[in-house]
Amino acid sequence: MTRTSWFRKIWKGRSKGVSTVIGTVFLILIIFMVSTNVLLWTFSQNALYTQAEKDLNQDEADRRNEKIEATDGDYSVSGNKVTVEVTLTNTGAVAAQIINLWVFDTSIQTYNHIQLNLSLSPGSVTDLTGGAAIVVTVDGANPGDDFISWFVTARGNTIALEKEVLEDVIVAQVAQGIGYLAMDFDTFRYFKYASDYVLEDYPGGSGSYIVPRTQPVVFRIRLTNYDPSGGNRSLTLNSHSLLWMYYPAVGKQVYWYIVNVSANGTISPTYSDIIIGFRETTYVYFASASDGTFTGTPDQKKPGTGGPAAINLLLLGKIGPSNYGQNIPFVSVYCT
């Protein structure tokens, strides 16, 4: 009886020591686990920070390497619609996305913008002229106003539009001698027909000076009103205006009357006067055998004769309130 009590006393003392050891071990394990988790969290946060800093540096490098040139810019105004024509060239080492175009009318201190989604790969050239031109609504804009504009990229860069440099004095002197309108040889195009009223390959057309003689064609030219009088007058082309082709070898002549062409390449059955504001550039189309109307196939014209031919423009209408007429020696073509 005495031995049993003695044993229990000894075991009771030892059990208290074992509990203390076990508790200490558990405490150390908990501290180890917490420390390990804190360490792992610290490593993960450091990795996230490092990656974020790397991404930020890469974005900054891409932004600095993004180089877009906006050249040969031009503006034309019809109502409140400002048409911006420009050539965009990606001269940088990274692809770029154009997301906005802002247009500011400095004459009336009014501006507006349009959202875009243009992707430009390195080295690519995007021609935003003709049917591909960008139209921005600017309330109160007039043809004689001055404009500045700039593109905005997805990376936040801005690209100022560089307007095509023109020697105004020389142009005015030339215009004073030959008339008010000047033409752009580089944008001369002809089109075939996709159907009775619809142009094929619109708005690109064919830029060659070799024209098919056996197919009906439509001619397009680009005209700019320089009005050297200083009055900044608008010029109106009426339905009597035409493109005249002459074959000197055989003495034959063929002509195409002026027509209206919609944004989808469709010729209108009736003609509405085309108004070209001061320093405004406009594409003009010649297609019909009839003055003021176009009836589809019956009015389609073909050159019909092979060989070299001279093309002249016989333009009629008004400059401001006054009557206007101008003959522009245009281009030479070879019909095959």
Image (cartoon, grey):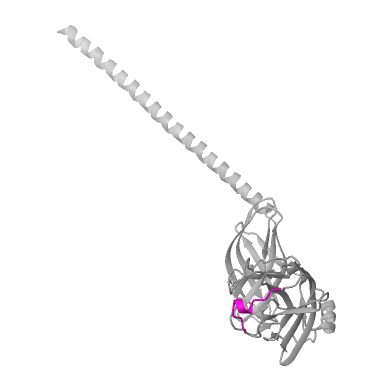
Residue 50 lies, with reference to residue 34, above or below; the image says: below
Asked if residue 120 can be seen in this view, the reply is yes
How far across and down, in percent of the image, does residue 133 sit? 64, 69
Residue lying at 36% horizontally and 26% vertically, measured from the top left = 26
Residue lying at 83% horizontally and 76% vertically, measured from the top left = 248
The furthest residue to the front: 250
- Main SS, magenta region, reads loop
Residue 265 lies within the magenta run: no
Residue 286 lies, with reference to residue 240, above or below; the image says: above
Image quarter where the N terminus lies is top left
Residue lying at 22% horizontally and 10% vertically, measured from the top left = 7
Residue lying at 69% horizontally and 74% vertically, measured from the top left = 302
Front residue of 128/152: it is 128
Is residue 46 shown left or right of residue 318? left
Asked if residue 278 can be seen in this view, the reply is no
- State the image quarter where residue 132 is shown: bottom right
The residue segment tinted magenta is 293-302
Front residue of 85/204: it is 204
Residue 333 lies, with reference to residue 15, above or below; the image says: below
Front residue of 11/85: it is 85
How far across and down, in percent of the image, does residue 223 sit? 73, 77
How far across and down, in percent of the image, does residue 17 sit? 31, 18
Residue 300 lies within the magenta run: yes
How far across and down, in percent of the image, does residue 20 sit? 33, 22
Is residue 27 shown left or right of residue 196? left
